[in-house]
Amino acid sequence: MKRNYWIAGLLSLCLTAQVSAQDATALKYAEKITAAGLEEKLTYLASDEMEGRDTGEKGQKMAAEYLANHYKSLGLAGPVNGDYLQKFNLASVSFSDVNLTVGKQKLVNNEDFVFIGDGDMKKAEKADLVFLGLASEENLAKVDVKGKLVGLWAIGERAQTVVRDVMDAGAAGIVIVTMEGQANFDRLANRYKSLSGRGRLGFEQPSKQEPIFLVSSDKMSSLFATPVEILKEAAKNNPQSIKSQKASYLIKKATKLVPTENVMGYLEGTDKKDEVLVISSHYDHTGIDSQGRINNGADDDGSGTVSVMQIAEAFAAAAKDGIKPRRSILFLNVTGEEKGLLGSEYYANNPIFPLENTVNNINIDMVGRIDYEYQDAEDQDYVYVIGSEMLSSQLKVINEYNNITYTGLKLDYRYDAEDDPNRFYYRSDHYNFAKNNIPVIFFFNGVHDDYHQHTDTVDKIEFPLMTKRAKLIFHTSWDLANREQRTPVDGTNTRTDR
């Protein structure tokens, strides 16, 4: 705590000589960010015409064109060989035929189980289904998993980690429980059923023969003909007490390429133009639901996207007046976030500007609403700030300094906790910059009842509050783009694995 006060004081002293000049200039161009401007842009971006901006679909393409034309109209450069679009292909993978039979039970896909693995088989395979429970070294020493389907009880565990451990031990496949209660599983299965016709989007890669079936705790009990409570106890240290079952499974896979694109506008800096500040949002959303309703995504992440557009307007207006930032700025709207942070992953693996020259990423994802935590609060002028002190000792202080100087929002850090059960740090596009040791700030308003629903519409956006949040991001970005030294990377990234 004392260290942060010392840094804040030092930064304040260092900036004193230029604050009076910069205050007037920064304030002048911050006024380009208006509630009316945000509402006008969001009304179009989150309209039914965009059909929910699903990755690779018509509405996402329309949104990309809208963003590209906006940056062009501002006089920003297209940094992709003169273009504003970074085009690439994703692979849409669908599993047309997935069967699982255990004993005499023929299970139904997206009802009795959800297929979350990979594979492509010419004919059905037979295997024993054995119960391992927890994927501990002790249990693996008691149960022979080689060539078997393995029952895992992974409630409260990192499913990806335990699956990998068991597959590496020689398992043929996995039947896994990750949540308590049939109702929770049914909600997930219904979502997978509604999405099954679209296929899973990701990067094209060779098929892995890794059949992984997610089931409810009740279904696992049924498969082994053993009560749930007995399975829970056996999972800890006595898995061999559960009788194995005969099983067979079949997986058939189809793949097609889906073209999509990130959108970007570039403002070249002056004396530090080789250093780049990235201001990002994702502009995709989840499209049309299984009942034909459009998920407009006004808050998620139309709010972040139009904030980036207006911040770009402010910087572009200053540039037209001859006041360009010292560092270059890349305004980046990525695709495929809702499918697994795919657009930002593609950019990080194929950067237009070297990652070592990327000084910071300021990411904006949902800044237009008031969440559960603040819906009844007297003071609702808040924003959640995530990740700002992980990699750099200065970034959080710089943001707080600009908030104190210009906007006076309550900066809430509750989701910065490493054990945050919501795992918001891992769930937006800043993650793909942070994992490459680029200091980040993620601005976020929290979740609400309309999150990922067709009811996330423009009429529910709090435009005055959203304007204030966007102005804070502008001021922090102005500071980062113009200060003498880039923020140091003097912290350790302890959260590199999703």
Image (cartoon, rainbow, N blue to C red):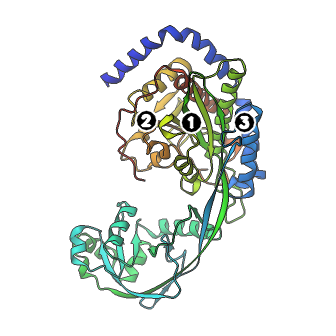
Give amino acid for label 1: Val
Q: Secondary structure at mark 3?
A: helix
Task: Examine the rendered structure and indicate whether residue 53 appears above or below residue 36.
Answer: below
Q: Residues within 10 Å of mark 2 (few under 14, many from 20)?
A: few
- Residue occupied by mark 3: 71
Labels in figure, total:
3
Give the x, y percent position of residue 258.
66, 62
Q: Earlier in the sequence, mark 2 or mark 1?
A: 1
When the figure is inspected, residue 101 is found, relative to residue 134, above or below; the finding is: below
Front position among marks 2 and 3: 3
- Mark 2 is on which residue type? Tyr
Disc assigned to residue 413: 2
Q: Residues within 10 Å of mark 1 (few under 14, many from 20)?
A: many
To which residue does mark 1 refer? 278
Residue 347 screen position, x and y as percent: 56, 47
Q: Relative to residue 384, is residue 172 drawn left or right?
A: left
What distance separates the C-alpha of mark 2 from that of mark 1? 22 Å
- The answer to which of 189 and 478 lies nearer the viewer is 478
Secondary structure under tag 2 reads loop
